[in-house]
Image (tube, rainbow, N blue to C red):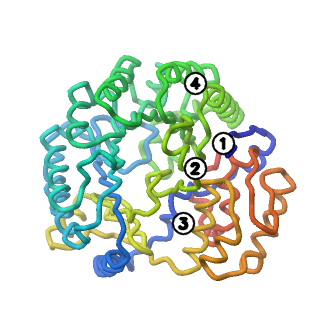
Amino acid sequence: MDQSIKFDLDLINRYDKAGPRYTSYPTALELHEGFADKEYREHICKSNAAGGPLSLYFHIPFCDTVCFYCACNKIITKNRKHAEPYLKNLFKEIATQGLLFDKNRVVNQLHWGGGTPTFLSFEQMKGLMDTTRQHFNLRDDDKGEYSIEVDPRETNDQTISQLRQLGFNRISLGLQDFNPEVQKAVNRIQTEEQTFAVLDAARREGFRSTSIDLIYGLPLQTVDTFSETLDKVLAVTPDRFSIFNYAHMPTRFKTQRQINDADIPSPEVKLNILQMMGNKLIEAGYVYIGMDHFAKPDDELAIAQREGKLYRNFQGYSTHSDCDLVGLGITSIGRVGDAYIQNVKTLDDYDGLISQGLLPVSKGVDLDEDDKLRRAVITQLICHFELEFNKIELQFDIVFANYFASELKNLQIMQADGLLIVTDQGIQVQTAGRLLIRNICMVFDKYLAQKQQQFSKVI
């Protein structure tokens, strides 16, 4: 499989409009409050009847300091004791959900995100993992994908050793940018020594995969400054890169209001950074997985993509398409059976529902047959850059050309622009279309028209 990309700045400029990131279809905007404890339990029953392995996501919302660019659900505090009542409720939720899921279902994937999971002490982290193991069927053979996001400013050699003892085998390091002026502008001061010491420790402890998170489009960034950061990281050869486009939306996210709008790079500079970044990574031997993600050719994501087994869920790209995803903790989102479920967003709401013995669900959505069909189409395109009509037709008992007649007509402009090729057999995304895969997927999104203003731009 060709896993390269082509930069056509004219095309990118013309197609750079707002759209979803498609970590799910329908997107999280379609979740509604008519879905709560009762509906979730019904879907868990259906999920158990179908069987299969599980994926667990834990949201740890605490951070020591605020990063001005952050749009995540977080709680800023330096008092580590603030995590204790939250963990008590989280333990209760784990026990409640654990009782509902079949104990024979193995947890093949586990992820701690946030926030800053390493905000927790080792005793707290151990308590969380022990409680999880008590109520869910965690693996003991290190063959699962057990990952954690870490802030190198909150992590040292001992922490990394402890995380490995707890069973984690994959690690993602938040960095964003090394430039001192950019770091000051976003309130995230982080040295090269801190960052690379954590990376080295993870390798010594036997973590199977290391990933570095960067953001382009932050205030005061230029092509030259971001190139310097990228060169420094490339020198230590992480297995994966996640390089996100910063979406400046201060009307929605309060912390972003502390960023000076005038310092944000122009669209032209952002595109030049993107082109430089892509060229450097490809020249360094990385392959483009899709939407912000690059990996070494022998990485599991790259192999899964070549073998047609790559999947996308609320944590991004994954090799575990067969897993139902169970969300735990405030604001977490799960996918169980044919439903998406999101927990409440505040500590008070979480405490109130947990104290009543209820699942802390705030909203969810049941997928109908059209949703599942369009999800399959979008997943194939966003993961593999191609779609075979006959597979979709057999799975959903449709005639693709008839069901998606208007969508195929809308793709004609993209075909004329060289983004893709449509034949009687399927759709093949071209190298120039891969950076614009969100635009292609948007053609198949029936909900998009009334919701588009709520998404960030694709580039």
Judged by depth in the image, the label closer to the viewer, 4 or 1, is 1
Report how far apart the C-alphas of labels 3 and 2 lie in the structure: 19 Å
Image spot of residue 342 (x, y percent): 37, 65
State how many labels appear.
4
Circle 3: element type: loop
Image spot of residue 239 (x, y percent): 47, 33
Res. 226 mark: 4
Amino acid type of the residue that numbered disc 4 sits on in the rendered structure: Phe
Circle 4: element type: helix
Which numbered disc flags the more N-terminal residue, 4 or 3?
3
Badge 4 crowding class, 10 Å Cα cut-off, few under 14, some 14 to 19, many 20 or more, is many
Which numbered disc flags the more N-terminal residue, 1 or 2?
1
Judged by depth in the image, the label closer to the viewer, 4 or 2, is 2
Badge 1 crowding class, 10 Å Cα cut-off, few under 14, some 14 to 19, many 20 or more, is some
Disc 1 to disc 2: CB gap under 8 Å? yes
Report how far apart the C-alphas of labels 4 and 1 lie in the structure: 24 Å
Q: Is residue 112 above or below residue 362?
A: above
Residue pictured at 54% horizontal, 30% vertical = 219
Circle 2: element type: helix
Report how far apart the C-alphas of labels 4 and 2 lie in the structure: 28 Å
Q: Which residue is mark 1?
A: 3
Front-lying residue, 219 or 417: 417
Q: Which residue is mark 2?
A: 305
Residue pictured at 64% horizontal, 58% vertical = 381
Disc 1 to disc 3: CB gap under 8 Å? no
